[in-house]
Image (cartoon, rainbow, N blue to C red):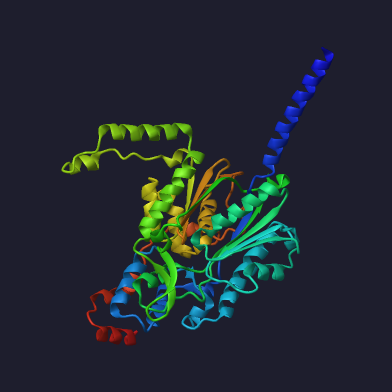
Amino acid sequence: MDLLCVLSSLLISYLIFKIWKRIDSKRDQNCYILDYQCHKPSDDRMVSTQFSGEIILRNKHMRLNEYKFLLKAIVSSGIGEQTYAPRLFFEGREECPTQQDALSEMEEFYIDTIKKLLERNKLSPSDIDVLVVNVAMLNSTPSLSARIINHYKMREDIKVFNLTAMGCSASVISVDIVKNIFKTYKNKLALVVTSESLSQNWYNGNNRSMILANCLFRSGGCAVLLTNKRCLSGRAMFKLKCLVRTHHGAREDSYNACVQKEDELGRVGIHLDKTLPKAATRAFVDNLKVITPKILPVTELFRFVLSLLLKKLRGNPSKGSTAVAQAAPKAGINFKTGIDHFCIHTGGKAVIDAIGYSLDLSEYDLEPARMTLHRFGNTSASSLWYVLGYMEAKKRLRRGDRVFMISFGAGFKCNSCVWEVVRDLNVGESLGNVWNHCIDQYPPKSIVNPFLEKYGWIREEDDHDTFKIREEAM
């Protein structure tokens, strides 16, 4: 009987030990954000309305109709007068960039951001175990990640990932890489560096589907410090709760929705196809199908399913009953039952509006994305971190809050993730917040673009000769 008790005690102890070990190992797989640093280029790279007009007028390939198209696009873009461009634009060399221009643009970014991030956290470059770099439109030899390692003299055993051509959703992809590394390796520090190279990617043609990209993209970038060290969890800002990646590259229309290509005269640019909105919607819906059950309470999921069943039981209204159809209740999920803040990629005003409508978000929810687009433009994969910085600077983030990041990218991809705020983030605590210098000015009373006031006369022109006279007068 005593032997049986001993064996039973040993078995129970063993089971308890295995359960504890399993739980303990999971704790070491958590992914935390310790800190992040967005890049604010120097003021001599600021793009005003006046300067934007000068850049556009330098393009000798465009006709009057293309100027009118650009005017409409810029006015409705949601971009303000304080975004940033590469230096060669101010030197009038956007039509003949060199590789050194692109490399200098990247060096100015990563030397500034990584240095500030490491110094603020009292870390040495040799403390970094994992480096993930994503810059979609620049592929150099040695790679950008190798250049960063060389500049900061990082360790020879550092694990390195250099991502290119992954588009505006590469930030979330980089976090996913780090998350998976943390599942295998304990007590690691990871550095994610995300930006975009514009120097060699200005389109100088007149194809409408390709000149649109010139209106939205601006210079920027971000460096993010992540860890799974348990001893640093108390210092962390955010904890990753879940991450979902959706890729529709197997679908031809989605694959061709956003493509770098040559126009009829061999000028390279980003072609934005008319199928892009449909491709983005489809990827977004499929992504939500996977992540929604992971982030919303069961009660809300049950309510949504019940709402769908009731709608089917009622049946669809007849085709002639338009008023009835418009008055019918719209079945949708209330994402605010599980999410407190929405960090939306600043792909453009239309993108922000579409996501806001789909998720039934208020103007308060959309304000961080709108203000980021207005102040910094679309900085590609780093846009999400500027939006997050706005929330932090506005004192919106409190312990336990959940932040939903949503991004899109060529391929076509939709990637999303949810972060939990680990501790209250008070304004002034993060000295490196890129919004600190101007947050009191946001949101402004109006974000109407002054392009219409200055260049609205283009709408009234009816021939190219008249336009040329106007151009010479300016």
Q: Is residue 206 above or below residue 388?
A: below
Image coords of residue 134 (percent x, y): 58, 63
Q: Is residue 240 left or right of residue 188?
A: left
Q: Quadrant of residue 155?
A: bottom right
Q: Nearer the viewer, residue 320 or 383?
A: 320
Q: Is residue 224 above or below residue 81?
A: above
> On the image, which quarter does residue 463 sit in?
bottom left
Give the residue drawn at x 37%, y 31%: 306
Q: Residue at x 71, y 47 (%)?
A: 229
Instruction: Looking at the picture, tell me which residue is in the foreground, 407 or 394.
Output: 407
Image spot of residue 428 (x, y percent): 60, 54
In percent of width and height, residue 473 lies at 32, 86
Quarter of the image for residue 144 reads bottom right
Along the horizontal axis of the image, is 269 left or right of 423? left
Can you see residue 199? yes
Which residue lies most toward the right here?
Answer: 2
Q: Residue furthest left?
A: 320
Position of the C terminus, as image quadrant, is: bottom left
| Quadrant of the rendering where the N terminus is positioned | top right
Q: What residue is rendered at 54% in x and 51% in y?
A: 392
Q: Which residue does the image show at 63% across and 50% down from the upper left?
A: 180
Please tell me whether residue 445 is drawn above or below residue 360 in the rendered image: below
Judge from the rendering whether residue 258 lies leftward or rightward of residue 392; answer left or right: left
- Image coordinates of residue 410 in percent, x first then y, are 46, 62
